[in-house]
Amino acid sequence: MAEMIKAAVFVEPGRIELDDKPMPDIGPNDALLRITTTTICGTDVHILKGEYPVEKGLTIGHEPVGIIEKLGSNVQGYREGQRVIAGAICPSGYSNACLDGLCSQDGQHHKHGLKPMGGWRFGNTIDGTQAEYVRVPDAMANLSPVPDGLTDEQVLMCPDIMSTGFAGAESGKIKIGDTVVVFAQGPIGLCATAGAKLCGATTIITVDSVPERLEISRAMGADHTIDFRSTDPVAEIMKITDGRGVDVAIEALGLQATFENCLRVLKPGGTLSSLGVYSGDLKIPLDAFHAGLGDNKIITSLCPGGKERMRRLMEVISSGRVDLKPLVTHRYKLDDIVAAYDLFSNQRDGVLKVAITPN
């Protein structure tokens, strides 16, 4: 009889439950990873609520830290027992999109042609990481060894949150001396703040309503913090910038209001860098868009993945330039994943990220 493993499975909108599934089979280019730590992402909450569609019975999760249990026959340069991470986005390395420098958009074929975001496979199109084991496809493009001396929790943000947040700063083409605002200081927004500082921004403004998050954002590099419940953020940002507006505004929440505020605080020629996952249509207000004549850029980013991206992010952690340990606020066993989802999706008890460890 096939060996069974525990996995968090999407049952129907409103229900992700722990279930038994067969141990994943691996092909010649794959690796089997024994998960040591994973986590829940805001995107998983969109899946839980039925706002982002996945197949019923799919294992959820896309942020793996683990040990190589088994390697496919073609996989070279790795050994069983090695500690590794893989990105949430696990590109094949040989698709049109990959060879065009857009690994995240690794063109995955489905019944309606090419699907955007095809590089995001774990917990989207194949079984994910909230389980005891996961199959990592195209292992040689995706597995990145964890440097000795870094804990699971130190690298837990690399597969998604850190890569996504940094992408918001990188896509925005932040320059040395720039003024940048980041709307929302959840885990991705906090990483965008850290990324903006690394890119050379010298005035960083962050907007949120949770005092603890604003406090952490100062540690990540914020020079000014705005509580939008007590202050109109647009007016305050224009005051801080002496009416110039910001060079780059990063949207890290996925709401109409934050998207619109980003547009309203941009200087002429500024860039709106959007990271949010939107679950409804967006409207662009005429005045904030300067009738289309403001020389503005609106750019979106999906988490860059692949082993080289992961290596670079772990180098940032190793160097001590950024410390993301404060983002892990809660710890749960895989057995208690339903309770962890309840805490995380309702944003209780100051939760930022939850470390999930198999038993």
Image (cartoon, rainbow, N blue to C red):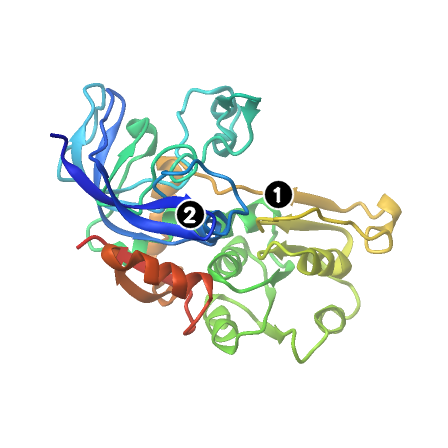
The residue at 58%/51% (across/down) is: 276
Q: Are marks 1 and 2 in contact (CB under 8 Å)?
A: no
Amino acid type, mark 1: Thr
Towards the viewer: 272 or 69: 69
Question: At which x and y percent is residue 32?
Answer: 21, 33
Q: Which mark is residue 160?
A: 2
Kindly indicate the quadrant of the structure image that contains residue 328: bottom left
Quarter occupied by the C terminus: bottom left
Q: Amino acid at mark 2?
A: Asp
- Disc 1 is placed on an element classified as strand
Q: Quadrant of residue 208?
A: bottom right
Indicate which disc residue 40 carries.
none
Q: Quadrant of residue 25?
A: top left
Does residue 78 appear left or right of residue 284 in this picture? left
Task: Tell me the element at label 2.
Answer: helix
Figure check: 340 above or below 224: above
Nearest the viewer among 231 and 308 is 231
Location of residue 244 with respect to 227 vertically, above or below? above
Identify which residue, 66 or 132, lies in the foreground: 132
Q: Is residue 283 left or right of residue 98?
A: right
- Asked whether the viewer can see residue 320, the reply is no
Seen in the picture, residue 12 relative to 357 is either above or below; the reply is above
* Residue lying at 29% horizontally and 29% vertically, measured from the top left: 139
In this rendering, does residue 78 appear at all?
yes
Q: Report the residue marked by disc 1.
A: 300
Horizontal side of residue 330 vs 54, given as left or right: left
